[in-house]
Image (spheres, rainbow, N blue to C red):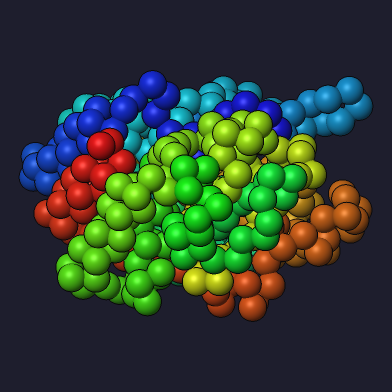
Amino acid sequence: MAGLDRRTVLKGVGGVAALGASAGMLTLFDTPDREQDPTTCVADDVSDTDKRLVYSNWPEYIDEDDGDYVSTKTQFERDTGIKVAYTADVNDNNEFFAKVSNQLGSCSSSKRDLFSLTDWMAARMIQVGWIQKLDAANVPNLHANIIDSLKAPEWDPKREYSAPWQSGLTGIAYNKSKVGEIKSFKELLTRKDLKGRISLLTEMRDTMGFLLMVNGGDPEKFSDDEWQNAIDLLKKARSDGQVRSFTGNEYVQDLASGNVVACEAWSGDIANAGDDNLVWIPPEEGIMIWADNMIVPNLATHQGNAEKWIDYYYQPEVAAKLADYNSYICPVKGAQEAMEKVNPDNVENELIFPTEKTLSETHRFMALDESTMRTYEGDFADVTSS
């Protein structure tokens, strides 16, 4: 899987510009007149007569037709007669928010029936009333087959509004042809042989989750003082010259070429890099975990078709084919058994089917209120853009 990845951040946007986008996003979310009542901001569902679906997702996140191989999307279209306009235009949560916020914030159509966003952004859109509730009767596979670790997030405990597309882990990657084994995030920040040769991610929640853990904190519950200590640790690593850069997906190319020898990394990137020298490992401090979630925006005109899509991808056989392609955590029970027929080599792949022990070592980032988020985003940008 070359090129862009589902976690790719804003292209060509520096830290200051990124902060501006983030601050603007938070201001809009905090404005009362942006909130909607999803029960009144609805459109007629024409799914029965108009067999179409408009879906926005992250780049390089779905399998494609190849020779005799029939992709999951093509099979869905054949099985249902629904034509899917699938667009990989979610390059970053904030960037995508900017594309749709004016419409959704004023109860106007985003011209989409479905899109996928990471936990924190999906939660925020649900909280301000921009997302439609799913008809549980239309997505029985979702409720029957979603894995336990993703079943009940605090922001959508009954999965009434959202369905994970894929999930993933954030950890460490290193180039074993350039450097010896790295076991912890603390090593990444302090080892002298790594000075100036590492990169960290521009995704605040991933990077700061690890900085909190290095200091003995819990990313899921921490104080302002613990946050400040973690920021100070990041500042020190930056001022000491330990960190070469803060990056998005381009770290894969830098790691392969030797521009950096180790970095913070997303699991699927390394699994699909096609380079045996690149190794992804869970840091000793723990692992950050995230999910991208399918959600139906207000005024979607093909919600029934979107629900058929969601239900289709929660069939274990379909989920196994998708996971075999992108090597992210599969959210569907039974897919591991189904993988026996798809690709036996991936049945025990922990990047797709992590064990309970691995999952017990994962952490999510604490939910933040608007004011705190603005402060934390600003603190992080001050370091990463300096």
- How many numbered circles does the render carry? 0
* Residue 269 occupies quadrant: top right
Determine the residue positioned at 56% across, 39% down. Answer: 260
Determine the residue positioned at 72% across, 50% down. Answer: 176
Residue 330, percent from left and from top: 66, 56
Identify which residue, 250 or 259, lies in the foreground: 259
Q: Residue furthest front?
A: 192
Q: Is residue 167 left or right of residue 9?
A: right
Determine the residue positioned at 45% across, 30% down. Answer: 91
* Residue 246 occupies quadrant: top left
Q: Is residue 292 visible?
A: no
Residue 12, percent from left and from top: 38, 21
Q: Is residue 270 above or below residue 187?
A: above
Q: Quadrant of the N terminus?
A: top right
Q: Residue furthest left?
A: 32
Identify which residue, 52 or 283, lies in the foreground: 283
Determine the residue positioned at 34% across, 50% down. Answer: 240
Q: Quadrant of the C terminus?
A: top left
Residue 174, percent from left and from top: 64, 50
Q: Is residue 257 left or right of residue 74?
A: left
Identify which residue, 132 or 13, lies in the foreground: 13
Q: Is residue 157 above or below residue 322?
A: below
Q: Is residue 208 visible?
A: yes
Q: Is residue 221 left or right of residue 1?
A: left
Q: Is residue 330 above or below residue 218?
A: above
